[in-house]
Image (spheres, rainbow, N blue to C red):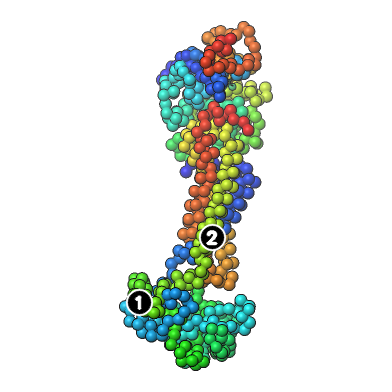
C-alpha cells in the first residue's frame, strides 16, 4: 500500500491527542482482553487430552446427595467406559477452617483405582505404591504440598463435619498435574472405619475415563439412561462441565462478562469517534487539497479510515500486551476455577481483539470520514476552522 | 495536439446557500490557447476562483459548456475527473496547502503515488521538479522549515511533477512578500516560455499581471471581453446576492 507512511504520519499529527487516544484504547482493550480471556477459558476452551476423556456422574438432583455403591459395577459395564473411580467428598476442616487459605478439596477414593482414571497424574512409582498400601495414606498435588510445606510422612489431621470424628492421615505421595493439583485423596477404607454400616454403601461421585473422545457423549447418555427410572437418577457430564457447575452463579457470570465487554466496547467507540471527528474536522481543507491533486473519494476514505484503524490497532496491541501481563498475575492468584490457573490471552482471542480494534477504529471514523470525503472540493477548500 | 486548451460557452455557476443564490460566474465565454499565459484580474468575490475551479473540474457548472484539453469535463464521472486532473492540471493555491507532516519531496511525490510508477521513478521526477523550482537542496525539509516563497515553490513543483499541460494558479503571490512574489512569477513565466505550459494566474496585483502575456478582467461574475478593461474600477464589490425567483436582477445592477 502506497499510503501507509502518510497514514502513520497523519496519525501522529497531533501527538498528544493521538497518544491519549491510544492510551485509552489500550486500557479498554486490556480490560477487554482479560474479560475475553476469562470468557474463552471458561466457556470455549477445549478440555485437554485426558481431561476431555473424563466424565463425572453425580446424583441428578444435587451434588450433596449420594448414590448407591453398586452403581460402580453397572457403570463399568457401559460400553466405551475404560475405568471408573468412585469418590466421596469429605469436607471437614484442616487447621482453622475459618481461614479460607486452609480450604482445599478432600476426597475419599479407592487408591488402587485412582491412577486408572487419572492417567495424567505424574508420580514417583514408589510413592504411588506407598499410597496404595497405606490404609491411612494421603495423596496430594504438588501445589498443595508446596503451599503448606508438607513433606512425605507429614501427619495431616482432618476434623469431620459431614462425617463424624477425625482423620489422621500420613502423606505418602505427591503427584504433579498442570491444573488439578490442589486436592487431597485418601482411602475409602479409612473413612468407612468410623461409619455405621448403613452409611458405608454410598458414593458421592463417579469419575469415569472414556475409551475415546467419540465415546464421551454416548457414555454420558447411556449412564444417565441406565438409572433414569431408578429412585436415584444420575447426571453425567464432562469433567470440565462438572467443574463449572460448581459455580452456580456462572450463568450470571456469562451475562456479566458480556455486559462488561459491551460497556468497554462502547467506551472505545466513543473515545475513538471523538478523536477521529476532531482530527478529520481539522483536515477538512486538506481533503480538498488531496482531491485537487487527484485523490478520489475512495482514496480519501481509505486514508482517513486507515488512520483510525491504525490508531485503534496500536491501542489494541498495547492493551493486549498489558492484558497478557495481567493474566500472568491472575494465574498466581488462588484459583476459584481451575481455568484461571492457566489464564492467558490465547492467540485466537488476540486475533479477534485485533480485528475488533480495526473494526472499531473504522466504525468510529466512518461518519466524519464519509462527510469529509464526499464534500465538494470547493467547499472543503473554503473551510476554515 | 489540441490547440485550444480551455473553451467555455455561456459558462455559469450559481451557488445556492439556503434561500440565497449567488451568481458567481455569469455566461462566461473564455478561450485559452496552448502556450498562453493569462492573468485573470478582478476585485474580491468577482468569480475568478470560480472560473479556475470550473476549469480544473473541481466544481461543476450550473449551465453552459466547458471543454478543457478537448475533454467535456462536465460529462466525466467523479473518478475519471480525479484521474484526469491528476494528469492534466496542476493547481497552485494562494495558501500553498502543503501537507505539513510531509517533507518537500514527499509533498511533491504525492500526486505521483496515484500513477503507476516505481518508487525510484517517483523520486527522480520529484527531484527534477524540485530542482526546477530551485529547491534541489531542500528536499528533506518540512513545510514549517521553509519560507513562504519556498513553500509556494514546493507547491509549484507538486503542481508540475505530473507534467500537466495546464497550470492554474489562484493568487499564487497573495501571501508572499515582494521578493518571493517576484521569484514565483518568474518561475511561472519560465514554465510558460521554456516548457510550453499553458498558465492562468489569478491576481489583483497589476504588477503581477504584467508577467502574463495577456490580462482578462472579471467583474461581478462577468468576464469582460478580450481586450476590454473596466474604466470604473471599484475594488471590494459586495457579493452579487439575488433571490431565487429573480436570479439575474442584482448581478446586472
Ligand atoms: N463554494 C461556494 N459556496 C457558496 N458561495 C461561493 C462558493 N464559492 C464562491 N462563492 C461565492 O461566489 C462568489 C465568487 O467567488 P470567488 O470565485 O471565490 O471570487 P474571487 O475568487 O474572485 O474572489 C462570491 O460571492 C463567493 O462568496
Ligand atoms: Mg478567489
Horizontal and vertical percent position of residue A99: 63, 78
B28 versus A133 height, above or below? above
A228 sits left or right of B190 in the view: left
Res A184 seen here = no
| Residue furthest top in the image | B231
Which residue position holds label 2? A256
Q: Secondary structure at mark 1?
A: loop
B139 versus B95 height, above or below? below
Give the quarter of the image for residue A276. top right
Which residue position holds label 1? A229
Between residue B58 and residue B164, name the one nearer to us.
B58
- Which quadrant of the picture is home to ligand 2? top right
Q: CA distance from mark 1 to mark 2?
A: 38 Å
Mark before the other along the chain sequence, 1 or 2: 1
Identify the chain of the residue marked 2, using the numbered disc in the image.
A
Horizontal and vertical percent position of residue A231: 39, 79
Identify the chain of the residue marked 1, using the numbered disc in the image.
A
Res A232 seen here = yes
Marker disc for residue B56: none
A68 versus B137 height, above or below? below
Between residue B30 and residue B19, name the one nearer to us.
B19
Which residue is pictured at 65% across the width and 25% down the height? B176
Q: Secondary structure at mark 2?
A: helix
Give the quarter of the image for residue A169. bottom right
- Of tags 1 and 2, the one toward the viewer is 1
Amino acid at each position: 500500500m502506497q499510503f501507509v507512511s502518510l497514514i502513520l504520519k497523519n496519525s501522529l499529527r497531533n501527538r498528544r491527542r493521538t497518544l491519549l487516544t491510544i492510551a485509552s484504547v489500550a486500557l479498554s482493550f486490556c480490560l477487554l482482553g482479560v474479560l475475553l480471556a476469562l470468557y474463552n477459558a471458561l466457556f470455549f476452551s477445549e478440555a485437554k487430552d485426558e481431561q476431555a476423556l473424563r466424565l463425572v456422574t453425580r446424583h441428578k438432583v444435587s451434588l450433596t446427595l449420594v448414590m448407591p455403591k453398586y452403581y460402580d459395577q453397572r457403570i463399568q459395564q457401559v460400553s466405551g467406559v475404560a475405568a471408573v473411580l468412585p469418590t466421596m467428598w469429605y469436607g471437614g476442616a484442616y487447621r482453622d477452617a475459618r481461614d479460607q487459605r486452609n480450604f482445599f478439596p478432600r476426597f475419599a477414593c479407592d487408591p488402587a483405582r485412582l491412577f486408572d482414571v487419572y492417567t495424567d497424574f505424574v508420580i514417583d512409582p514408589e510413592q504411588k505404591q506407598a499410597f496404595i498400601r497405606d490404609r491411612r495414606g494421603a495423596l496430594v498435588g504438588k501445589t498443595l504440598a508446596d503451599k503448606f510445606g508438607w513433606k512425605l510422612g507429614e501427619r495431616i489431621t482432618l476434623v469431620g463435619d459431614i462425617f463424624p470424628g477425625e482423620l489422621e492421615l500420613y502423606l505418602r505421595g505427591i503427584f504433579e498435574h498442570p491444573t488439578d493439583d490442589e486436592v487431597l485423596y485418601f482411602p475409602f477404607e479409612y473413612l468407612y472405619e468410623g461409619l455405621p454400616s448403613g452409611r458405608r454403601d454410598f458414593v458421592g461421585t463417579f469419575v469415569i475415563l472414556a475409551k475415546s473422545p467419540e465415546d464421551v457423549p454416548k457414555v454420558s447418555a447411556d449412564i444417565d439412561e441406565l438409572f433414569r427410572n431408578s429412585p436415584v437418577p444420575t447426571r453425567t457430564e464432562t469433567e470440565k462441565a462438572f467443574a463449572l457447575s460448581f459455580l452456580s452463579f456462572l450463568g450470571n457470570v456469562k451475562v456479566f462478562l458480556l455486559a462488561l465487554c459491551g460497556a468497554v466496547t462502547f467506551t472505545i467507540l466513543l473515545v475513538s469517534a471523538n478523536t477521529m471527528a476532531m482530527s478529520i474536522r481539522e483536515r477538512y481543507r486538506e481533503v480538498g487539497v488531496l482531491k485537487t491533486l487527484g485523490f478520489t473519494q475512495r482514496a480519501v476514505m481509505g486514508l482517513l479510515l486507515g488512520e483510525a484503524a491504525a490508531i485503534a490497532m496500536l491501542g489494541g496491541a498495547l492493551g493486549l500486551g498489558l492484558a497478557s501481563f495481567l493474566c500472568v498475575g491472575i494465574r498466581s492468584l488462588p484459583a476459584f476455577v481451575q481455568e484461571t490457573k492457566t489464564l492467558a490471552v490465547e492467540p485466537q482471542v488476540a486475533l479477534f481483539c485485533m480485528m475488533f480494534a480495526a473494526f472499531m477504529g473504522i466504525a468510529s471514523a466512518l461518519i466524519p470520514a464519509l462527510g469529509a470525503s464526499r464534500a465538494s472540493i470547493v467547499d472543503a477548500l473554503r473551510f476554515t476552522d | 495536439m489540441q490547440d485550444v486548451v480551455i473553451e467555455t460557452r455561456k459558462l455559469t455557476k450559481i451557488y445556492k446557500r439556503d434561500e440565497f443564490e449567488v451568481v458567481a460566474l455569469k455566461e462566461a465565454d473564455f478561450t485559452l490557447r496552448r502556450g498562453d499565459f493569462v492573468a485573470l484580474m478582478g476585485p474580491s468575490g468577482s468569480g475568478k476562483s470560480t472560473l479556475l475551479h470550473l476549469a480544473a473540474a473541481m466544481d461543476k457548472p450550473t449551465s453552459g459548456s466547458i471543454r478543457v484539453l478537448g475533454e467535456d469535463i462536465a460529462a466525466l464521472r467523479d473518478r475519471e475527473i480525479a484521474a484526469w486532473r491528476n494528469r492534466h492540471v496542476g493547481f497552485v493555491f494562494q495558501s500553498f496547502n502543503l501537507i505539513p507532516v510531509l517533507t518537500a519531496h514527499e509533498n511533491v511525490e504525492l500526486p505521483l503515488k496515484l500513477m503507476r510508477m516505481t518508487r525510484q521513478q517517483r523520486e527522480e521526477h520529484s527531484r527534477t521538479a524540485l530542482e526546477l523550482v530551485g529547491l534541489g537542496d531542500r528536499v528533506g525539509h518540512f513545510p514549517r522549515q521553509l519560507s513562504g516563497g519556498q513553500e509556494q515553490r514546493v507547491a509549484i513543483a507538486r503542481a508540475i511533477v505530473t507534467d500537466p499541460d495546464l497550470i492554474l494558479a489562484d493568487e499564487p503571490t497573495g501571501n508572499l512578500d515582494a521578493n518571493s512574489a517576484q521569484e514565483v512569477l518568474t518561475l511561472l513565466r519560465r514554465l510558460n516560455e521554456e516548457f510550453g505550459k499553458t498558465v492562468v494566474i489569478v491576481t489583483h496585483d497589476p504588477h503581477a499581471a504584467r508577467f502574463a502575456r495577456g490580462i482578462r478582467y472579471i467583474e461581478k461574475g462577468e468576464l469582460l471581453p478580450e481586450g476590454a478593461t473596466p474604466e470604473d474600477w471599484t475594488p471590494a464589490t459586495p457579493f452579487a446576492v439575488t433571490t431565487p425567483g429573480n436570479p439575474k436582477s442584482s448581478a446586472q445592477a
